[in-house]
Amino acid sequence: MTKLLLSLHVLAALMAVGPVAVAASMFPAAVRRAHAEGPDAAGRATVRVLHRVCRVYGAVAIAVPVFGFATADRMGVLGSAWLVTSIALTGVAAVLLVLLILPAQDDLVDLLDGDTGALERSRTARLAMLTGVFNLLWAAVTVLMIVRPGSTTGA
C-alpha cells in the first residue's frame, strides 16, 4: 500500500505541479507578446490557455499533499523535520499561487481582453519573479523528498 500511495503522490506532483510550473513561467512573456500583437492576435488565446492550465492544474494539485500525507503516515515519518519543512514550503507555494500569481494572471487577462491601454512591464516582471519563487519552492520540496535527511535508503 505504501508503494501505491508513494507512486500516486509522485505522479500527482509530476502531472499537476509540473504543468503549473511551466505554464506560469510562460505566462508573462506570452502576455507581453499578445499585448504587442494587438487585439486580434492569436497570442491572446495562448494567454488564456496558459491561465486556464494554471487554474485547473493548480486545483488538481491538491492531490499532491493528500497522497503525501497518506504516504508519510504509512511510512511513520509525519514528525520528521524534512517532511515538516516540505509541508511548510508546499504551503508557501500554494499561498503564492492562490493569492498572488493567479490574481495577477486574472488582471493581465482582463487587461488584454479590455484592451485598456499600455501594459506596464513591471507587472509582468513582478509576475515572472513570483513564478520563479514558486518554482524554486517546488524545487526545494523535490530535493527534500529525494534526499530526505536521515533516510535509511542509503542513497
Image (tube, helix red, strand yellow):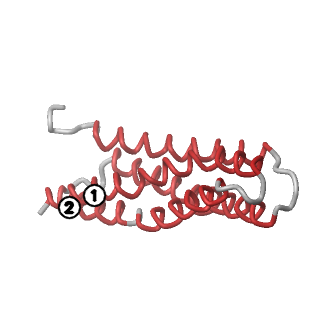
Q: Position of residue 56 (x, y in %)?
A: 48, 67
Give the quarter of the figure containing the N terminus.
bottom left
Taking the image as shown, residue 9 lies to the left or right of residue 74, namely: right
Q: Position of residue 108 (x, y in %)?
A: 72, 58
Q: Residue furthest left?
A: 1
Residue at 20 percent of width and 61 percent of height: 5
Q: Is residue 63 above or below residue 153?
A: below
The answer for how far apart the CA atoms under marks 2 and 1 are is: 6 Å
Mark 1 highlights which residue?
9
Asked whether disc 2 touches disc 1, contact meaning CB atoms under 8 Å apart, the reply is yes
Residue at 15 percent of width and 38 percent of height: 152
Give SS at disc 2: helix
Q: Amino acid at mark 1?
A: His
Q: Position of residue 96 (x, y in %)?
A: 58, 55
Give SS at disc 1: helix
Q: Residue furthest top?
A: 155
Dot 1 alpha-carbon crowd within 10 angstroms: few under 14, some 14 to 19, many 20 or more: many
Give the quarter of the figure containing the C terminus.
top left
Taking the image as shown, residue 112 lies to the left or right of residue 85, namely: right
Which image quarter: residue 47?
bottom right
Mark 2 highlights which residue?
5
Q: Position of residue 13 (x, y in %)?
A: 35, 54
- In the image, 28 versus 146, the foreground residue is 28
- In the image, 109 versus 44, the foreground residue is 44
Q: Which label number is shown at residue 146? A: none
Residue at 82 percent of width and 47 percent of height: 120
Q: Amino acid at mark 2?
A: Leu
- In the image, 7 versus 120, the foreground residue is 120
Residue at 39 percent of width and 58 percent of height: 16
Q: Is residue 71 above or below residue 147?
A: below
